[in-house]
Image (spheres, rainbow, N blue to C red):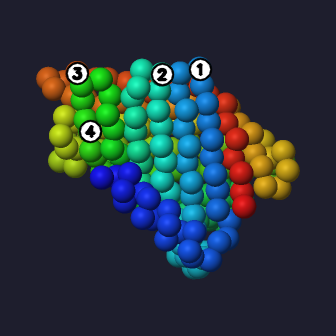
Amino acid sequence: MLLRIGSVLLGALFCAQVSANTLDINLSEDVAQFEFTHPIAASSGYGGSEVNFGFLYTTDDDVMGTLGFQIVDTAGSGSPGLDVGVGVKAFSATFGTHEVLAAGIGGEVIYSPSAFPRAVLNIELHYAPDIVSFIDANRLFNYGVRVGYEVVSQAMVYVGYRHVQVEVGNNVDIDIDNSGHIGLQLLF
């Protein structure tokens, strides 16, 4: 279902005016993730909005799709280089004998210090409690941190860590991903 929604959105996004799209690819020994982000409203006094969708798979044949929407803006005039995003993200996953559908809230913090403007620290967090976790899931928790360097104006390389954990059944926590990775982010 999430894959169908993502396909429709992908088609709509490519038909829309293209500006500042991001393709993010990150890999570890056992996990690959691909994520596409598209701005859908220019930054205004209330920030800019963006939609993103992604796909993650593992060597254990675990698969997870995501679809998200968030508002991103500068944290304030007293915090140069600090951007904050808040929004929602839907998760659809199949791992082992379990299937999960969850809607989380959360966001990210992006910091680029003025002394090193090409360096970027990014922290992301999403949480879906029991009330918005369905099928086999009781809750879902997703967080990640990455440190990157802008090699050229339209490409950044980074190292990161991601933890995606789902509670199923009788309070059994299962990690879909709990590993470090290397990545490449392209802006076009």
Q: Position of residue 153 (x, y in %)?
A: 83, 55
State how far apart marks 1 and 4 are (Cα). 24 Å
**Neighbour tally class for label 2: few under 14, some 14-19, many 20 plus, Cα within 10 Å:** few
Q: Earlier in the sequence, mark 1 or mark 2?
A: 1
Name the residue beneath numbered marker 2.
59
Q: Label 4's element?
A: strand
Q: Which residue is situated farthest in the left direction here?
A: 170
Name the residue beneath numbered marker 4.
100
Do the residues under discs 1 and 2 have CB atoms within 8 angstroms?
yes
Q: Disc 2 vs disc 3: which is toward the camera?
A: 2
Q: Position of residue 22 (x, y in %)?
A: 64, 56
- The three-letter code of the residue at mark 3 reads Val
State how far apart marks 4 and 2 are (Cα). 18 Å
State how far apart marks 3 and 4 are (Cα). 14 Å
- The three-letter code of the residue at mark 1 reads Glu
Q: In terms of image quadrants, where is residue 188? A: bottom right
Name the residue beneath numbered marker 3.
172
**Neighbour tally class for label 1: few under 14, some 14-19, many 20 plus, Cα within 10 Å:** few
Q: Position of residue 76 (x, y in %)?
A: 62, 65
Q: Earlier in the sequence, mark 1 or mark 4?
A: 1
- Per the rendering, the mark at residue 80 is none
- The three-letter code of the residue at mark 2 reads Thr
- Per the rendering, the mark at residue 29 is 1
Identified at 57% across, 76% down, the residue is 16
Q: Label 3's element?
A: strand
Q: Position of residue 32 (x, y in %)?
A: 55, 32
Task: Note whether 62 is above or below 84 in the view shown.
Answer: above
